[in-house]
Image (cartoon, rainbow, N blue to C red):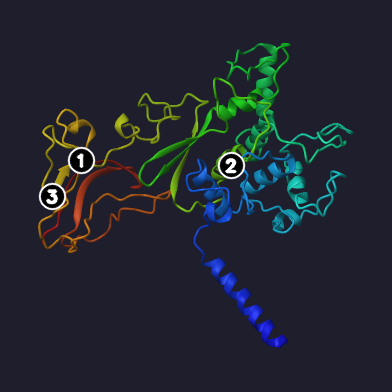
Amino acid sequence: MFKIFYLFFVIVLFLSKLNTSFATQLLPEDVFSDIKSDYKYYTELKTLLNKWIIKQSSNFEPTKLITKKEFLWYMVESNYKPCLSWSVDTDIIAKNYTWSFIDIPKTDDYFYCIEYANENKYFTTYEDWHKCEDWTFSKFCPNDKVSMEDAIKIALISSKIYSENEANNILSLISSWEKIFPDLSNDVKPKNLDWTVYNYYPYFKKANEYTLIKVDTDWNQKDYKFFDINSWKIEPKRQINKEDLIRISYIVSDLNTNYVDSGDDLSIVQDCSLDKDKDNDWINDCLDICVDIKWKEINNWCPVLEKFCDSDCSCSSWYICSDQNKSTCSKSWICIPEDNLPTYECLYKDTNVILSWNAICDTCPCDNYLDFKSDLRKCDLIFSAITSPDKSEIYWKWDFWEVKK
């Protein structure tokens, strides 16, 4: 009987692992009982959950405050370094860390996360016998809650967007009055009320200059900032909750290049701190999606390969204008394939499918390419184009021609 049970247990374990290996993506509502599909950070939570950066539990508790050791774990994991005691990265555990904080035993789940963060200078330790929020004394205070100040500083340093040396340079300029810096909000200014330098100002300044742009395959754009400014207030002293953590971790994990995304969307990072215009189209690279190519605003200053409708909203054979407003169709609308195409030997013979020449990229870089050495075949569509020297980009294209013989 024992042998039968043992065999059954092994089979169940194997099937469970097999099921995990081929499982579809985890859905937040299936993991957390308090999260529904209409949750405002649903997509972001789903992404982090499937990157194994979010712990699975019965409830997510979006408004729950975050402890310092939890936040460091999220920042280390968002940089793709598994550090929890039961999933620790071999590179981390091989370092044989010393015991840096006497109040963090090596048996603590977060021990390696804290040691890794400490070694990489994610945070500054306190003076000896610093009093924590729970009235204990520590150089680290693992159970203290995390302020927006510390969260922004650690996020920027851990993701290598900003360094402490860069921040110190800004602080020196503020202290010497060598350069005047603007207020970021009513409660984040270069100097405190007593005219001492506000030490977190450089980090908020840098974070405010960064925007992560996510563009899905339907070209719907969503922008992410490290913090929200409400009523011209940032509330830097406010303790962050899990919703703040989702937003910050989502940006940090996306900025880290060690992770290959699943292809659900494209990422573009805006750095508005520098006045750059690489293609000289009078649009700062911060706002210009195609920084190497001069083009028009209609497509975010990127090339438009589609053919615009004529002034009377007409198009060439087999195509129809995407809008019939004659006052705008020649400026803002493109020609798309008709729904009912005539029978023709070069057309794909399926009444439910229409093929268009448009190739949509859902990864970055895009896997689609042009073969410049390919033989021409009957029914191929060809076009003349101006390309970059390495033929990796199309600067301009002309009409399509079909090979009929």
Q: Which mark is residue 322?
A: 1
Whether residue 25 appears in this view of the structure is yes
The quarter of the picture where residue 138 lies is top right
Residues under labels 2 and 3: Cα distance?
Answer: 47 Å
Q: Residue at x 51, y 67 (%)?
A: 22
The 10 Å Cα crowd at callout 1, few under 14, some 14 to 19, many 20 or more, is some
Q: Is residue 51 visible?
A: no
Type of amino acid under label 2: Ile
Give the CA separation, mark 3 to mark 1: 13 Å
| Amino acid, disc 3 | Trp
Determine the image quadrant of residue 256: top right
Q: Position of residue 290 (x, y in %)?
A: 38, 36
Depth order, front residue of 377/58: 58
The residue wearing badge 3 is 318
Numbered disc 2: secondary structure: helix
Q: How many numbered circles are shown?
A: 3
Q: Earlier in the sequence, mark 2 or mark 3?
A: 2
Give the side of residue 62 with respect to residue 97, left or right: left
Kind of residue sitting beneath label 1: Ser
Query: Where's residue 269, x and y in %?
Result: 49, 37
Residue in the image at 80% along x and 35% along y? 125
Query: Is 229 or 1 nearer to us in this picture?
Result: 1
Q: Nearer the viewer, mark 2 or mark 3?
A: 2
User: Which residue was labeled with disc 2?
Assistant: 246
Tag 1 secondary structure:
loop
Given residues 357 and 354, the one toward you in this image is 354
